[in-house]
């Protein structure tokens, strides 16, 4: 049997990964042991362990098409512009407030997060902190560790001053997303009366979960014995808990924050704790991280529990989180951006129509070749769904002159004649299409035999197994192909 000729696989496939292995970088970490098995057959994975883009190697800035990142590095517009080939960023977590998602979209970079991970862990941690505030377990345990002896009820009463009964108290949740809902269900089991404020949810959510909804933050703060924050951080809610809103809270209320540190003004909180206006607070997140207990406004604040942004963590959730982030990168490499992405947060900011497209169709000069062999052009026909208002779509045919004439051309003279001409054009097109159809086959005529045709590379027919790998396939050993391709690249 003659030896099978080698197949040239250097060219790009229409629906597959680039044959030159793309570079994916973990920007602010070192451990890639979980990501590597998922990406090793489609990309080269490197780590940077950087705290800012000034610490990232020039090769990564010039060649990386994908980036994974935790919450310890910040990417502003100026930082994003340093990356020359970047097409997707996946935040290993749910919050994207450390990325300028709008600037990324305008640069053609998709930003994704992993919203489904760690819901149970954060909800459990939130309840743990709430219970500690109510029952003062943390402080009592520290007293025992320090050698304090409780010889009678008087000592217990003094040490446990401020302990409160949970049943019948009102827990107010700011934000009722995945984590907020999980906290609500847990809190009801402890006897809390749960209310929530979330202006972005449709009516009826409160009925399905058996909660009470309030429609202003002021109402929630006024009614709550304990306030727990579960909202994202943006330019509208920075320092949501401030001097004004703390005055709207019940005297002696508790405060818990497992969402984002920037939601709370530390100086105002420290003063409220010292004055007793807030009985106790528990913070897992901080505006300046890593948190230093010996610095900042909260260093001398009483009745405060601080943990190191660890509410999301468990052995199971950490593995799940990293697997989901790496799988999103894999989907981007083997598929089309953004259709294949499950959690893209900046679709509405994509510059779908490059500025030079109307002037000669040289969009590829503006957008270098993407992960799937070309830049995304889907919005030339469809607009991305968005809840934010947008201007009207730009015209791709206005090559000069007034833009208003391109967007709103004047009606032609003789509307009836135009309608008749359009009808005639439709009829002519239908007739032309009918002429292209084959003649009807007689009932008893034998049908001709047509050999099966398949795509060919180098003169050899290829089966469907040479198309893009299944995005849900993690390990290269599980990708089966009926066509064996000899490669000159080392594994």
Image: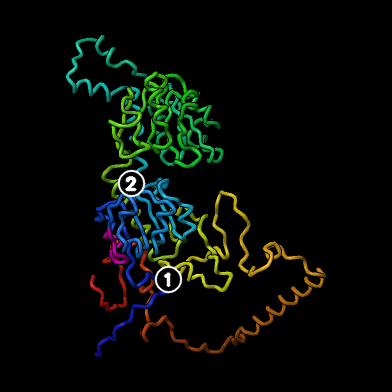
- Residue 418 lies, with reference to residue 144, above or below; the image says below
Q: Residue, x 38% and y 66% (percent of image)?
A: 334
| Residue occupied by mark 1 | 373
Residue nearest the viewer, comparing 273 with 385: 273
Looking at the image, is mark 1 or mark 2 nearer the viewer?
2
Residue 192: say if magenta.
Answer: no
Secondary structure category for the residue under label 2: loop
Q: What residue do we see at 44% from left, 65% from top?
A: 336
Name the residue that disc number 2 marks.
Answer: 72
Q: Position of residue 377 (x, y in %)?
A: 52, 66
| In this rendering, position of residue 299 left or right of residue 448 | left
List x then y, in percent, for residue 302.
32, 22
Q: Left or right of 234: which side holds 439? A: right
Vertical placement of 356 versus 298: above or below? below
- Quick check: 120 above or below 462? above
Judged from the image, the secondary structure of the residue bearing numbered disc 1 is loop
Quarter-of-image position of residue 138: top left
Q: Which mark is residue 82?
A: none
User: How much space separates mark 1 and mark 2, taking CA atoms?
Assistant: 32 Å
- Between discs 1 and 2, the one toward the N terminus: 2
Which stretch appears magenta?
Answer: 36-46
Q: Is residue 310 visible?
A: no
Q: Quadrant of the C terminus?
A: bottom left
């Amino acid at each position: 049997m003659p030896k099978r000729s080698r197949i040239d696989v250097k060219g790009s496939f229409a629906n597959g990964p680039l044959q030159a292995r793309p570079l994916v970088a973990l920007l602010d970490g070192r451990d890639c042991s979980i990501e590597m098995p998922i990406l090793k057959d489609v990309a080269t994975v490197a780590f940077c362990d950087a705290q800012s883009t000034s610490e990232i190697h020039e090769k990564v800035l010039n060649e990386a098409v994908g980036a994974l990142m935790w919450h310890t590095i910040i990417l502003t517009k100026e930082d994003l512009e340093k990356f020359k080939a970047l097409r997707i960023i996946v935040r290993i977590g749910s919050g994207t407030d450390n990325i300028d998602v709008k600037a990324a979209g305008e640069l053609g970079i998709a930003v994704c997060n992993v919203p489904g991970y760690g819901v149970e862990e954060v909800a459990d941690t939130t309840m743990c902190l709430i219970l500690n505030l109510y029952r003062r377990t943390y402080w009592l345990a520290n007293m025992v560790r320090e050698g304090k002896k409780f010889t009678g009820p008087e000592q217990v009463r003094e040490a446990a001053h401020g302990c409160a009964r949970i049943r019948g108290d009102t827990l107010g949740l700011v934000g009722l997303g995945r984590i907020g809902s999980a906290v609500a269900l847990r809190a009801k089991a402890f006897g809390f009366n749960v209310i929530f404020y979330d202006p972005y949810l449709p009516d009826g959510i409160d009925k399905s979960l058996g909660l009470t909804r309030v429609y202003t933050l002021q109402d929630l703060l006024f009614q709550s014995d304990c306030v727990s924050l579960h909202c994202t951080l943006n330019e509208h809610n920075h320092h949501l808990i401030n001097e004004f809103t703390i005055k709207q809270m019940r005297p002696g209320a508790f405060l818990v924050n497992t969402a984002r540190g920037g939601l709370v003004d530390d100086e105002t909180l420290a003063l409220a704790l010292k004055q007793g206006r807030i009985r106790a607070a528990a913070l897992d997140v901080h505006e300046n991280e890593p948190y230093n207990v010996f610095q900042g406004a909260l260093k001398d604040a009483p009745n405060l529990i601080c943990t190191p942004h660890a509410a999301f963590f468990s052995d199971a959730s950490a593995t799940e989180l990293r697997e989901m982030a790496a799988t999103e990168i894999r989907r981007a490499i083997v598929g089309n951006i953004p259709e294949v992405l499950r959690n893209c947060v900046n679709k509405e900011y994509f510059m779908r129509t490059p500025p030079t497209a109307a002037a000669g169709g040289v969009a590829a000069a503006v957008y270098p070749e993407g992960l799937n062999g070309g830049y995304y052009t889907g919005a030339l026909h469809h607009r991305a769904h968005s809840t934010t208002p947008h201007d009207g779509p730009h015209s791709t045919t206005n090559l000069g002159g007034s833009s208003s004439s391109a967007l709103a051309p004047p009606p032609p003279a003789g509307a009836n004649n135009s309608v008749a001409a359009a009808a005639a054009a439709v009829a002519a097109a239908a007739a032309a299409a009918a002429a292209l159809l084959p003649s009807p086959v007689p009932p008893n005529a034998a049908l001709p035999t047509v050999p099966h045709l398949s795509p060919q590379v180098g003169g050899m027919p290829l089966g469907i197994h040479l198309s893009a790998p299944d995005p849900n396939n993690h390990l290269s050993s599980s990708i089966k192909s009926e066509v064996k391709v000899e490669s000159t690249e080392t594994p």
